[in-house]
Image: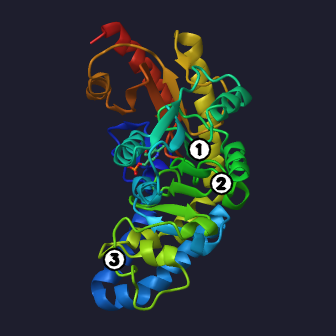
Amino acid sequence: MNKYRKQFLLDHSITHLNHASFGATPISIMHEYSHWQRKLEMNPVDFIDNQLPNLVQESRQKLSIFLNCDRDDIVYCPNPTTALNTVIRSLNLKANDEILTTDHEYGALSRTWNFICKKTGAKLIHHKVPFPITDEEDFIDSFLSKVNQRTKVIFISHITSPSSIIFPVQKICDYCNEKNIISIIDGAHVPGHIPLDIKSLNPDFYSGACHKWMCSPKGVSFLYAKKSMQEMIEPLIVSWGYEAEKPSHSQFLDYLQWQGTNDISAYLTIPSVIDNISDKKWKNKIAVCKENIQKVRKIILDKFDFTEFSELNYNLQMHSIVHNLQIENIKDKFYNNYKIQIPINVHNNYSYFRFSVHVYNEISEMEKFIDCFEDFMKKSF
Ligand SMILES: Cc1ncc(COP(=O)(O)O)c(C=O)c1O
């Protein structure tokens, strides 16, 4: 067995080719997580009232260095949905304001936009991403051609969930900064996956998940807000930081950091999580994962009449292939028969599957998937 597999709690009877959905956490980090939980339980009042604020600050400090931004421009949130809801619900949108986005965004966030547009009369403009993407410049030009006087916000994923595409967010943020349009970047799949330098990117708002590619315990994500935008952020949950008795230097932190009593031990593991993913051997294994994705991609495209959402090579640990088989409950049927955990879904009428792999995966598992998928097609359940 792959030596990394032993470092995770993943069930050995399952072939796990879906790291991207919820991540997986090394046992060593789970121990650290439980160490913080035990410390909290030994003296909850002292730990939460007196120790936690400094510990969370140290953890944010380490994360901010990893992301290259200022410590107090990021705040922890349990997930990107919470982080981005906070931003979206703080925007003072008016009837006929426009939000430009793509049709490859994460469903929960599209719903958030639908909700806010129904309330305010603002309009969500979905740019239809070409199928397949063959040229980044063409994509950017046609996307930005939808901007007009009413465009208040551009909302876009850095890496898309269904299609595993890296959108050119640097160019989009540069454009937004020049034209005074609010940029909100959904970077759920980015931290620990591709390099992220927030200072250079310079978005207005950015959210990333730490429990996906950084492999932290579940429920760790962050919201970054540019200093000049922090004042406009309202708390999604109003708690003690609103009208704080002793306000800190940052309203942004006061409003968002304390959201009522909760176990936030997972946030405290981030310094160890970053040390873990900075290990040279771990990084080497990730490079192999990326090569394996490319090899498997090639095998599949040579063997089957399948296509891809994008013909550009992104060098990621995830990749989506469009197969267009029309089988009801395909994902469950496939899982029940072969015990392979992989998303097989439909996006914009395209049926696709998405590999996503981490250090604990071997290429043989993806090859097994190919054999099983071939068998599945023959049997046409
Ligand atoms: C692109 C994208 N955005 C946001 C999310 C966040 O989801 P959640 O807040 O449910 O963790 C995901 C989760 O997979 C995602 O893929």
- Looking at the rendered structure, the kind of residue marked 1 is His
Q: Nearer the viewer, mark 3 or mark 1?
A: 3
**Residue, x 32% and y 79% (percent of image)?**
38
* Label 1 with label 2: CB-CB less than 8 Å: yes
* Quarter residue 42 falls in: bottom left
Q: Work out whether 335 lies above or below 360.
A: above
Q: Nearer the viewer, residue 212 or 122?
A: 122
- Residue 314, given in percent of the width and then of the height, sits at 65, 34
Q: Nearer the viewer, residue 279 or 354?
A: 354
Which of the image's four quarters has the C terminus? top left
Q: Looking at the image, can residue 365 be seen?
A: no
Spatial CA distance of label 3 from label 2 is 31 Å
What SS does tag 3 mark?
Answer: loop
Q: Is residue 138 above or below residue 118?
A: above
What is the crowding at mark 3: few (fewer than 14 residues within 10 Å), some, or many (at least 20)? some
Residue at 58 percent of width and 74 percent of height: 72
Give the vertical position of 24 relative to 365 (above or below): below
Q: How far apart in space, not on screen, are marks 1 and 2 (Cα)?
A: 10 Å
Query: Can you identify the residue that label 3 sits on?
Result: 239
Task: Tell me the SS state at disc 1.
Answer: loop
The picture quadrant where one finds residue 276 is: bottom right
Q: Would residue 256 be found to the left or right of residue 42 on screen?
A: right
Q: Which mark is residue 196?
A: 2
| Mark identifier at residue 158 | 1
Q: Earlier in the sequence, mark 1 or mark 2?
A: 1
Q: Earlier in the sequence, mark 3 or mark 2?
A: 2
Cα distance between the residues tagged 3 and 1: 31 Å
Q: Badges 3 and 2: C-beta atoms under 8 Å apart?
A: no
Tag 2: amino acid: Leu
